[in-house]
Image (tube, grey):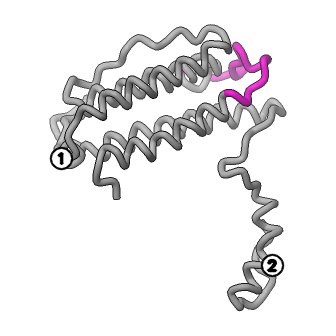
Amino acid sequence: MITSIQEFLRYFDGVHKRAIRDVAALPPEADGWAPSSGDGERAWSINKLVGHMAGSRLYFASAYAGDGWISPPPPDVSIRERWIPALEVSHGQFSEVLRGTPDQWLQRKVETIDSDWGLSGWRILMMMAEHDIHHRSQIDTYAGMNGWDVPQIYNRSAETIGGLQPAQIARHGKAGPGHQL
């Protein structure tokens, strides 16, 4: 359980670094790429998704800080060279807002955008992280569909883990071959 703003910021630093890693891995032809069909978010270009990730971090920060569920204008991510700087700036701005808040705010209730019931502050922060991860995964899916490299989440593929299973089974005295993934 996250009990301090510093703990959450350390956690989010990892989420952010993986977003940077995956966006940076996209090839030049990803610039402007969008699904061939769909509407709304299902048809957004990679550029728009990156801008949405950057802007949404500040949307959740605004709600957490008690300043309302207000979306800032998205950053200019019209070209690939602006993607990483936009994510870095939003990470810095988000972190700065949170650093100025007391740990007790993690437990306080914040009214939702579309009702008068509240969510705990920690839940709003986790919603932001889950949102970031969701769109990073969307971008990774698009990369896979196009045959572009998709970084492994912890620098280990399922095949690598599967190959390590026999040693783990032997080490822990388990029976059977295990699942090779």
Please indicate whether residue 65 sits to the left or right of residue 165 in the image: left
Compared to residue 23, the image places residue 160 above or below, namely below
Name the one closer to the observer, 100 or 170: 100
Q: Secondary structure at mark 1?
A: helix
Residue 107 pos. (x, y %): 20, 49
In what quadrant of the picture does the C terminus appear? bottom right
Name the one closer to the observer, 9 or 105: 9
Q: Amino acid at mark 2?
A: Pro
Name the one closer to the observer, 150 or 20: 20
The majority secondary structure of the magenta stretch comes to: loop
Residues drawn in magenta: 24-40
Instruction: Find disc 2 in the rendering and name its residue.
Output: 166
Q: Is residue 82 magenta?
A: no
The residue under the point 74% across, 55% down is 156
The residue under the point 32% across, 40% down is 124
Instruction: Find disc 1 in the rendering and name its residue.
Output: 104
Q: Amino acid at mark 1?
A: Gln
Structural distance between the alpha carbons of marks 1 and 2 = 47 Å
Comes first in the chain, label 1 or label 2? 1
Frontmost of labels 1 and 2 is: 1
Compared to residue 59, the image places residue 15 above or below, namely below
The residue under the point 19% across, 35% down is 111
Residue 35 pos. (x, y %): 70, 22
Please indicate whether residue 168 sits to the left or right of residue 78 in the image: right
Q: Secondary structure at mark 2?
A: helix
Residue 2 pos. (x, y %): 33, 54
